[in-house]
Image (tube, coloured by chain):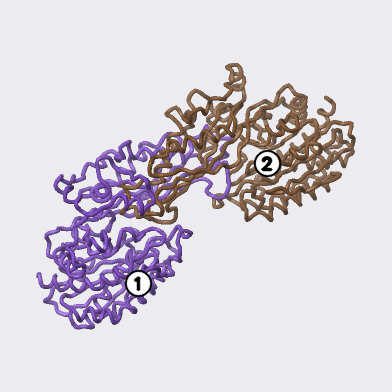
Chain colours: A purple, B brown
Amino acid sequence: MQIWKEYQEKHKERFLKELLELLRIPSVSARTENKQDMIHCAESVKQRLLEAGADTVTIYETAGHPIVYGEKIFDPAKPTILVYGHYDVQPADPLELWKSGPFEPTIIDGKIFARGSADDKGQFYMHVKALETMTSTNTLQANIKFLIEGEEEVGSPNLATFVKANKALLKADVILISDTSMLSMENPSIDIGVRGLSYIEVTVTGPNRDLHSGVYGGAVANPITMLAKMIASCHDENNHITIPGFYDDVVASTNAERAKMALAPFNENEYKTDLGLTHLWGEKGFTTNERTGIRPTLEVNGIWGGYTGEGAKTVLPAKAFAKISCRLVPNQSSVKITEKILNYFKTIAPAGVTVTAEEHHGGEPYMTPIDSDAYQAAARAINTTFGKEPIPVRGGGSIPICALFEKELGLKIVFMGFGLDSDNLHSPNEKFDIVNFYKGIETIPYFHQYYAEGK
Amino acid sequence: MQIWKEYQEKHKERFLKELLELLRIPSVSARTENKQDMIHCAESVKQRLLEAGADTVTIYETAGHPIVYGEKIFDPAKPTILVYGHYDVQPADPLELWKSGPFEPTIIDGKIFARGSADDKGQFYMHVKALETMTSTNTLQANIKFLIEGEEEVGSPNLATFVKANKALLKADVILISDTSMLSMENPSIDIGVRGLSYIEVTVTGPNRDLHSGVYGGAVANPITMLAKMIASCHDENNHITIPGFYDDVVASTNAERAKMALAPFNENEYKTDLGLTHLWGEKGFTTNERTGIRPTLEVNGIWGGYTGEGAKTVLPAKAFAKISCRLVPNQSSVKITEKILNYFKTIAPAGVTVTAEEHHGGEPYMTPIDSDAYQAAARAINTTFGKEPIPVRGGGSIPICALFEKELGLKIVFMGFGLDSDNLHSPNEKFDIVNFYKGIETIPYFHQYYAEGK
């Protein structure tokens, strides 16, 4: 629609400026020290939604960080699109690797460098600006509801309670999420699945105090060494995960499905060059895209213990720690896998150390049906603005709340993400290309139009 | 000698007070931020030596922290005892486990809690107070030289240069070191060996940036997992070290030697209770005392990588790090072992990661001859003040400079340590019993007397 394009072209500098302001708020949900920033961020989101044309916006308190809910109901007879997104971001560590401040958004070569630029402030904000476009040009075709939470990066611990208690409020026809990536701007794609997640933090305890490694070394089990042995044992020589029962519930992809996936454009040399690697790694018998898409994984996200400062200290530490997470595929259950990992670690802990574990957030895997109205509308919208049919792919990341949405609200989800794999999500120098931001704002109204037409 | 006892009894409160003042200086040699504290500490040591009766005291600059040299030459015809000690201390981390500030010495139940209380400020200071005792009572029997360095805890990187350049200055008949422990006050002992040390810091590098563990997990070698596998592979199922050639130069103790060692009092249940452990650990075929005395070991002193903050972060980190040290026994060579470990890690590094390593300080193992004049004088001195013949034992710790002293100065070393294994050396809540401090000051003049008599 020419009228959308004209409006967006006229206001695009302001759209970008508003996003940069939002990116300046250090809304790190994992850190208690950012509690006030979270409140500040929720209030900013509320204000922006009202400015964009929402009828009402409410901040709901939770046991953790607040949820922002807003809606624009222009005709109850029309279909309703529920947009889910999150205003919280991952911690910015390691800070020293950022080329500019993680909360001082910096534009270089048309890319916005900031924590949360792609994940997910930049992406949910496209929907806010799409709302503004449609209300300002009087072209709304569907009702729109916004559910923007502040705990996605810590596993949405309070969203389930909210969703269960507010089913009427959240009543809609489809859920639309922009929190994933495309293969590239030349090869637009739609994620048709997200992986589930199990996340544990393991503490290995040996002696009741740090010991002198000369006086006690060799006679007392070293918690770091024992933890290393436990981690090492999680993968066998083929990089299969060895935890008993880990693969029990995995639905194997058929050869036909795998053959179809293999058609997606992928250049292994470019992939390696981008990562600075000469060799890739992974489960024997699967391609790189299969390893990150259809197979479950186990990764150590952090490890620490003993002396980690400057120079040398000859200590045999009392404790060692690791953060370990698994990505899950249908029909693995986060609860079951977490239990299996915990049991495994406790079972293999050698005499002389004890293992305790804390469970961080988890989430179930989710697959979106490719033959649904919503998927078809998304594919058509992307085809309209990109001039190319999007490729369906299975993404490696997790949006823990998806399975719950389906169960509690009875809704299907469509992932219309405009990020790129190279956006450095969860890493230093996270970025979002300005062109992708604008392309998203341009594409979303078409989704509304096609989805409303299809209903 | 009654006159020593009387003098010490009269001044003991001051002796203690002076030590506490020295312990207040955070002389952590490993940390550049403590550089000024190191200078301050060296100056304090100089002042105390002058007050105790030294003729001259000089602070020698080095490429690192300064060396304090002082002497009391009362009769060049008499034998000369060179006292070696160190005024630097280990880092105090982890700070949160200290019950009182590491540099705020606190006396509880007759124990001085402070970093450096036993290792080694409290111990070398016994020699300063013994000097004061003998000069004040006009009872010197031997000349005395003090070599108190500031880099023992970082491997004495600049002491060798100093020793080689100052052989005339350091000319003596024997080296006396109080930097080791006794079995107990009821079972006094003398260390007849210290182990050598190799210390490396390993960096495992994978991708060129931290990655999202959902997007890349399973397809890229995780540096933490690879490091864990490498560490895990260093010990086999019998806890023998697997590094090729590691044991090549180890001089095996004879059955007779091992039988004699087994006579030293040792209660394994008390040892376990003290450490809060239900099971010990170690190399198959050796007892606990053998594992810490006559066998080489490999311990991980620190490990870190990825996200180690509060909560959860789903990152596949670019790098992982470990500090790893080995204790060595005769005739292992620190240089050779360091090279073997480095080669081993580089050899086993899987494709997809690279290993680099930095070498921290090392030192050679050292054995003191039990039939020497000096050992005999030390045994007699301890017998005099403790009323019991000391047991010769092989200690687990390292004093890296010993082998060099023997080589460059042609001197034998006697270890007359008054600490206890329970002193929490290198750990939080390091302590030194006041009774041990006084017992040391009481015993040292007898060593001077017996050693001078034996010459």
* Residue B350 seen in the figure: yes
Q: Residues within 10 Å of mark 1 (few under 14, many from 20)?
A: many
Q: Is residue A183 above or below residue B382?
A: below
> Mark 2 belongs to which amino acid?
Asp
Image quadrant where one finds the N terminus of chain A = bottom left
Q: Which residue is mark 2?
A: B433
User: In front: mark 2 or mark 1?
Assistant: 1
Task: Indicate the position of residue B262 as horizontal and vertical percent values.
Answer: 59, 22
Image quadrant where one finds the C terminus of chain A = bottom left
Front-most of B47 and B252? B252
> Mark 1 belongs to which amino acid?
Ala
Q: Is residue A424 above or below residue A10?
A: above
Q: Is residue B228 left or right of residue B3?
A: left
Q: Residue at x 12, y 75 (%)?
A: A78
Q: Secondary structure at mark 2?
A: strand
Task: Indicate the position of residue A385 as horizontal and vertical percent values.
Answer: 20, 70
Q: Is residue B257 above or below residue B214?
A: above
* Chain that bears disc 2: B
Task: Indicate the position of residue B443 as horizontal and vertical percent values.
Answer: 77, 34
The quarter of the picture where residue B449 lies is top right
Q: Residues within 10 Å of mark 2 (few under 14, many from 20)?
A: many
The quarter of the picture where residue B384 lies is top right
Q: Residue at x 20, y 74 (%)?
A: A445
Q: Is residue B110 left or right of residue B166?
A: left
Q: Is residue B164 above or below residue A66?
A: above
Q: Which mark is residue A42?
A: 1
Q: Are marks 2 and 1 on the same chain?
A: no
Q: Residue at x 21, y 67 (%)?
A: A386
Q: Which mark is residue A263?
A: none
